Amino acid sequence: GGGGRSMRAPASTLCCLAACCCGPAAAFAPQLAPRHGRQCRVARLVAAEPAAVAAQKPAGGPPIPGGGGGPPPGGGGGPPKGGPPERTAVQKALDTLFELAFKVLYATEPDLRLDSYKNLQVLWVRALLASSGQLDDPVAYQLLPPASRWLVSPAVAPLWAPVLPKLEWIAQRTSFLDSTLDAWIDGLKASGVSPAEAQVVLLGAGYDTRALRYSGDQAPAFYEVDLPVVTRAKGVLSSRYAAATGVRQPAMLPLDLMTCASGAPALEALAPLGLDRSRPTLVVFEAVLFYLSPPAKAALLREAAALLAEGHPASELALTDNLAPFLRSADRKDADDYFGGSLGLQLRQHETLWGGAIQFARAGAKSGE
């Protein structure tokens, strides 16, 4: 245990964490179903939805508790200006509690107070899931403050068993994207392309550990894009970890992705950092589109689609995200229509959560393009 430390502290902290950390998804997820193996075949969750419930779905958007997809009547894909659904009074109260707990967790790490506590919640969850054996991420725990990370250590992790089901969506999206990245790298090798010649772009990277986990002489180059305050704090963590382990750090671009709505490019802005559009590139969206207005979301997706269409034939897009108001359906045909029509891409893999509120997709340029 914690050398006599009270268990009430981790209990209150992680309960707040479980309620807050899932980001906007927590605001509309009716209930997470059990995992179906490491690959998290989330499409089965959709298939199990009763036909009667499906027939009563509103027009679209994320599911509402007890029902299928669709925002409250009159909604248009989130609040009027886009972004995640409004948080309830209980969720806001838990946000406040965790903000207080954050000050304790990072009492010995003043540099990391550059960033909001909300952006660090998922990192703690990844560490907890890894300590619980539900996620393959040995790096997350190492990025936490040494003085307080015992709260999610393997020795303490069993205490959090009751909250783990609430964190399933993070495990599912991580597993999907990791398996997609693995398959993409294997495909490059099979076609005679060295992964060292490839690139991975993580849009809205937050505290994603993928760049550090996949680092190596023959690994792709990683590029991360996020808000300036996030990249500054993430840079502190990455630098420390790289100094201790010798891994290669990702290139980071501080950028507010909402500016894409007014024509500011995101992927093009990575060129000065070394991104080469002629090389095989995997563009990753992981729970970032929730936070963007529909115009910003559409512009960013179009820019990614253009890179795939104009760049290396092995370039692909992978996402675990919300695509409302453009795609709210769990139906593969609707997904094919959106990716093939609006984006001009070929959808290669498609799964969903919560009636289509969350889309898990892998896509590439259409054959011959």
Image (tube, rainbow, N blue to C red):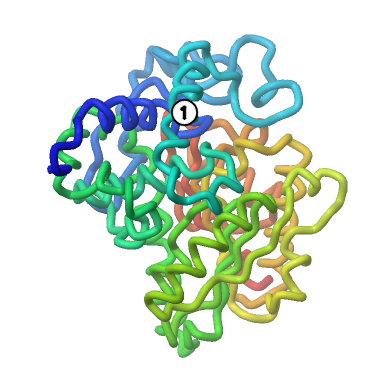
Examine the rendering and report whether any part of residue 314 can be seen.
no
* Residue 161 in the figure: left or right of residue 25: left
**In the image, residue 167 above or below residue 63:** below
Q: At which x and y percent is residue 150?
A: 25, 47
Badge 1: how crowded within 10 Å, few (<14), some, or many (20+)? few
Q: Residue at x 44, y 87 (%)?
A: 217
Q: Residue at x 62, y 57 (%)?
A: 231
Q: At which x and y percent is residue 51?
A: 37, 18
Q: Quadrant of residue 284?
A: bottom right
Q: Quadrant of residue 15?
A: top left
Q: Residue at x 63, y 9 (%)?
A: 73
Q: Nearer the viewer, residue 224 or 50?
A: 224
**In the image, residue 157 above or below residue 369:** above
Q: Nearer the viewer, residue 245 or 364?
A: 245
Q: Residue at x 36, y 30 (%)?
A: 18
Q: Which residue of the protein is positioned furthest toward the right in this rendering?
A: 262
Q: At which x and y percent is residue 264?
A: 84, 54
- Which quadrant would the N terminus be assigned to in this image? top left
Examine the rendering and report whether any part of residue 3 can be seen.
yes
- Which quadrant would the C terminus be assigned to in this image? bottom right
* Residue 259 in the figure: left or right of residue 333: right
Disc 1 element = helix
**In the image, residue 213 above or below residue 17:** below
Residue carrying label 1: 100
**In the image, residue 157 above or below residue 325:** below
* Residue 240 in the figure: left or right of residue 300: left
Label 1 amino acid?
Leu
